[in-house]
Amino acid sequence: MRHLTLAAVMALLSAPAFAAGHASGDAAAGEEQFNRQCVACHVIVNDAGETLAGRNARTGPNLYNVTARGIGMYPDFAYGDSLVELGATGEMWTEENFVGYVQDPTGWLREKLDNRRARGKMAYQVRAEEDAINLYAYLASFSAE
Ligand code: HEC
C-alpha cells in the first residue's frame, strides 16, 4: 500500500506538465509579446555576454535560462524578499508557476507563501493567460542544456 502510494506520487511528479522548462505555448508568439511587454525592464543575455533579446534594461533580472535556474537565482540582482523566500524552498519556474506569477506577481506570491504581507517587486501584469503561456515557451527556448 505504501509503495503504491509512493509510486503514484512519483508518477505525478515526473509528469511532463509539472517539469520546469516544459512549455505548451507558441514561442514565436511569445517573442512578439516579449518585445512588446517585457523589454522595458528585462534583457536576455547569455553566459558569453551576448544580448539575445531586449536592449539594456536592468530594472528586472536577466531572463536567460530562467526556466531552468530556479526562482530568484540570478546573481547580483536585488530581488524582493518574497521571491527569494520562495526560491529558497526549491520551487522552480514551471509553466504553471510562471503563468500565475506574471499575471499578478504580488497576489501569486501571497498565495504561494500563504502570507498576506508577501510582495512582488515586479510592477507589471500580463493581461492574457495565452500571452503568458506563449511567453513561457519563448523563455524556455533560451534554456542552456
Ligand atoms: C516595470 C518593469 C518590469 C516589466 C515591464 C516586467 N518585469 Fe519581470 N521583473 C521585474 C522586476 C523588478 C523583477 C524582480 C521581482 C522581485 O524581486 O520581486 C522581475 C522578475 C521577473 C521574473 C522572475 C525572475 C527570476 O529570476 O526568478 C520573471 C520570470 C519575469 N520578471 C518575467 C517577466 C515577463 C515575461 C515580462 C513581460 C511580460 C516582465 N517580466 C515584465 C520588472 C519588470
Image: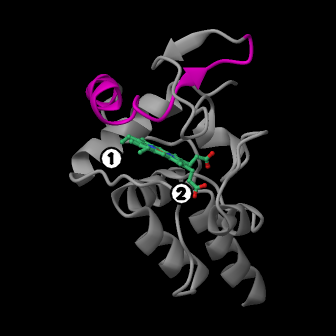
Task: Say what amino acid the circle numbered 1 marks.
Answer: Ala
Would you name the residue on which mark 1 appears? 132
**Camera-side residue: 77 or 135?**
77
Residue 111 in picture, x, y percent from top left: 49, 80
- State the residue at coordinates (60%, 79%): 113
Classify 8 as above or below 133. below
Classify 119 as above or below 27. below
Task: Report the span colored magenta.
Answer: 28-48
Residue 37 in picture, x, y percent from top left: 31, 36
- Circle 2 packing at 10 Å, graded few (<14), some (14-19), many (20+), is some
Q: Is residue 116 left or right of residue 73?
A: left
- State the residue at coordinates (57%, 12%): 51
Would you name the residue on which mark 2 appears? 18
Q: In this view, does 87 lie to the left or right of 131?
A: right
Q: Callout 1: helix, strand or loop?
A: helix
Q: Callout 2: helix, strand or loop?
A: helix
Residue 45 in picture, x, y percent from top left: 61, 19
Mark 1 vs mark 2: which is more N-terminal?
A: 2
Label 1 within 8 A of ligand 1 by Cβ: yes
Quarter containing the N terminus = bottom right
Quarter containing the C terminus = top right
